[in-house]
Image (cartoon, helix red, strand yellow):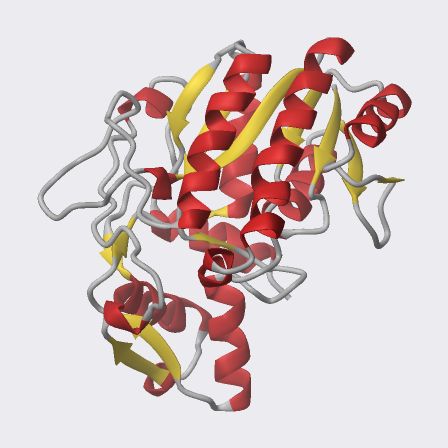
Amino acid sequence: MRIAIFGAGGLVGSHAARFFRSRGHTAIAIGRSGAMDIVADATDSAAVQKALAKAKPDAIINAIKCRMPTDAAETAKNEAWLSNVVAAENIAAASCKAGARLVHISSAWVYEGKEGESYNEESITYPLNFYAYTKAVAEERVLHHAPNALVLRSDCVFGEDPHLADFFSRLKTACKKGEKFPAAQGQFSQPIFAGEIARLSEALLASKASGIFNCVGPDYLSRHSLAITMCGLFGFDKSVVAPAPHSARAIRVPLFLRLDISKINSVCKVKSLDAQLSDLKQGAS
């Protein structure tokens, strides 16, 4: 299978490219700059169509994530909108013209994340900040242009990030430098390894599935507990992990993202956090 990966220079995209190549597929890395197979700005619809005409993919993964911190989207709204909405719409529209299946990586932040609630794919969305709002709008536009697309709602994605921006990469850097790493005790979610998202994407594409899927891990824990767990497995110094209140964020965020993953499990069972961390360790440098 030929797979075009937009955002291949980022966390999810880079792991997807490695995974699909390891499985014998042809992965075409597409990004705005860097060592890409095709350089293209996805906010330019003509550039997207030209890239896909060259790539000739059977499937497309949109793993584009705005490089700014999510908090910054509240003020840099135009940049966030271009990366999260315009690019997604361009890719979805072009995927239909190219006759290729689309996997769109979204965010579980489209849910409110209220304590005591659990969210399935039919739950009402209620974005709490501008970043989350752009992700919700993007989902609507993607499914409008590509009704058979796969929309994967993920959260707390970790791995070896080329930009060192994800939870694991920041923790690893802090430990190397001996710096304190603030980790919220009051923010809960179900972390997922970027490589696991790629594995699940392959299974979903093979099953001819479509629509929205909660794509998170089965283990529900706080950011603080996640940091301690990672330190234990990778031999990092746990003393650098500093308990932090969720109120340290400059924006409102979902604090209790407990997601029902029975739908995705019916296609391909999501690995446990321990198994995902083991996969990361085997490939981590």
Quadrant of the rendering where the N terminus is positioned: top right
Which residue lies most toward the right here?
54
Residue at 42%, 48% in the rendered image: 130
Horizontal side, residue 256 vs residue 4: left or right: left
In this rendering, the count of numbered labels is 0
Residue closest to the eye, 80 or 192: 80
Residue closest to the eye, 17 or 57: 57
Place of residue 150 in the rendered image (x, y in percent of width and height, measured from the top left): 51, 20
Residue closest to the eye, 246 or 144: 144
**Do we see residue 192 in this rendering?**
no
Place of residue 158 in the rendered image (x, y in percent of width and height, measured from the top left): 48, 55
Which residue lies most toward the left here?
116
**Do we see residue 188 in this rendering?**
yes
Residue at 40%, 86% in the rendered image: 180
Residue 154 falls in image quadrant = top left
Quadrant of the rendering where the C terminus is positioned: bottom right
Please say if 248 is above or below 60.
below
Residue at 48%, 36% in the rendered image: 106
Please say if 284 is above or below 210.
below
Please say if 108 is above or below 147.
below
Residue 165 falls in image quadrant = bottom right
Place of residue 17 in the rendered image (x, y in percent of width and height, measured from the top left): 71, 40
Please say if 233 is above or below 145.
below
Residue at 79%, 39% in the rendered image: 30
